[in-house]
Image (cartoon, helix red, strand yellow):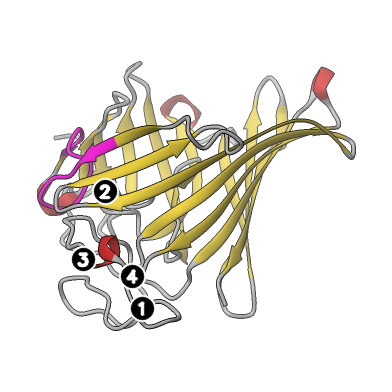
Amino acid sequence: SDDPVEDEPGIEQGGGTGTDDDGKEEGGGNDDGKEDDEELTESAYKPFVTDKRISKVVEERFYYGNYSGQRGYTIYELSYDAKGRLKEYVHYILHKKGSEVTSQDTSLYRMTYTKNKIITHITLDISAPDEYYENVIELNEYGYDDRNSYKAGGYLRFDTQGNTNYSYDKNGNKIKWTTSAKANYYCTYTDYKNDASIEINLGGISIPSDLHGKRCANLPEAKQYEKDLGTPYGDFYNYTFDSKGRLTEMEVVTNSVWNGKRTDKIYHFTYEE
C-alpha cells in the first residue's frame, strides 16, 4: 500500500461524560422522567456521547459576482431523545437579498430507531403535514449505514458517493481518499476536538451524525487536491469557541487560482443549556 500512515487505527469512539465502555449513556430522561417507546428501543446505532449538544445550526452561504450581496441560509433546529439520539429536526432553506427574504422552504424530519434500522419520516412542506415519505437506513453491526463498506473497527472504506481508499492517521482522522472521478484529496487537522453532538466533516456537517463510520477525532484545518499540495490553494477552516470551549462558529474559506481567497460558508452553532 502507498498509504502515508497506518490504515486502521485502534482508537475508540468517545467524548463527553457519563458513558461506559460500550458507548451507552448513563441516566438521562425527559423533563417528566419518562421515555417514550422509541427512546427505549435498543438500536445498533449509538450516538456520539457528549454534553455539547447542539440545538441549532445556521449555515450561511456567501455569493459573489452577479449575485454579490445575496446570502443563502440553511437552518436546522434539533431535538434529541433520552438516549442522546436525534429525535427530530426542522429544516429551513431561505435566501436573502439585503434584508429581503426572496424564498423560503421549511421541512420536518422525525426519526424512529429500531434494532437494525433508522426510519425518517420526512414532511417536505411543513404546511402540508399529510404529504410525506419515509427514508429507511439499514444498519450494520457497528450501527452505521450498511450501504457503505468499512474497515475493522467501523472506519469508512468507501461510500455510496463513490469516494474510496480512505486512509487515516493514528487519531482516526481521514487524511487521504479518492473520489469517483479518481481525484485524490488530502486533509490536515487542528488540535481541536470534534466533540459536539453534530459531527463536523470535511466540508460541512453531518445531520444525522455518526452514520458513516467513526467520526474524525479532530476538526479539519485544510483540504486540498493532490495537485494543490505545497500551494496556498484549497479549502481552509477557521473556528470560534465560547467560554465553555464549545464550537460556536466555523468559517470555510476557499482559495483558488480563478477566484482568489474568499469566504464560502460560515456555520453558526447554538447549544442546549
Q: In this rendering, which labeled residue sits more in front, label 3 or label 1? A: 1
Residues at badges 2 and 4 in contact (C-beta under 8 Å)?
no
**Crowd rating for badge 2 (residues with CA inside 10 Å; few <14, some 14–19, many 20+):** many
Q: What element carries label 2?
A: strand
Q: Which kind of residue does numbered mark 3 sit on? A: Glu
Q: Mark 1 points at which residue?
A: 29
Q: State left or right for residue 265 relative to residue 135.
A: right
Q: Is residue 110 above or below residue 78?
A: above
Separation of residues labelled 1 and 4 (CA atoms) = 14 Å
Q: In this rendering, which labeled residue sits more in front, label 3 or label 2? A: 3
Q: In this rendering, which labeled residue sits more in front, label 1 or label 4? A: 1
Separation of residues labelled 3 and 1 (CA atoms) = 25 Å
Instruction: Kindly identify which numbered label has been placed on residue 12.
Output: 3
Sequence-earlier tag: 3 or 1:
3
Q: Quadrant of residue 212?
A: top left
Q: Which kind of residue does numbered mark 1 sit on? A: Gly
Q: State left or right for residue 96 relative to residue 145.
A: right
Sequence-earlier tag: 3 or 4:
3
Q: Which residue is drawn at 35% across and 54% down?
A: 216
Q: Name the residue under label 4.
A: 49
Residue 146 on the magenta segment: yes
Given residues 239 and 266, the one toward you in this image is 266
Given residues 252 and 16, the one toward you in this image is 16
Q: Position of residue 99 (x, y in %)?
A: 89, 40
Given residues 6 and 143, the one toward you in this image is 143
Q: Position of residue 266 (x, y in %)?
A: 66, 47
- Region rendered in magenta: 136-149
Sequence-earlier tag: 1 or 2:
1
Q: In this view, does 124 lie above or below 205?
A: above
Q: In this rendering, which labeled residue sits more in front, label 3 or label 4? A: 4
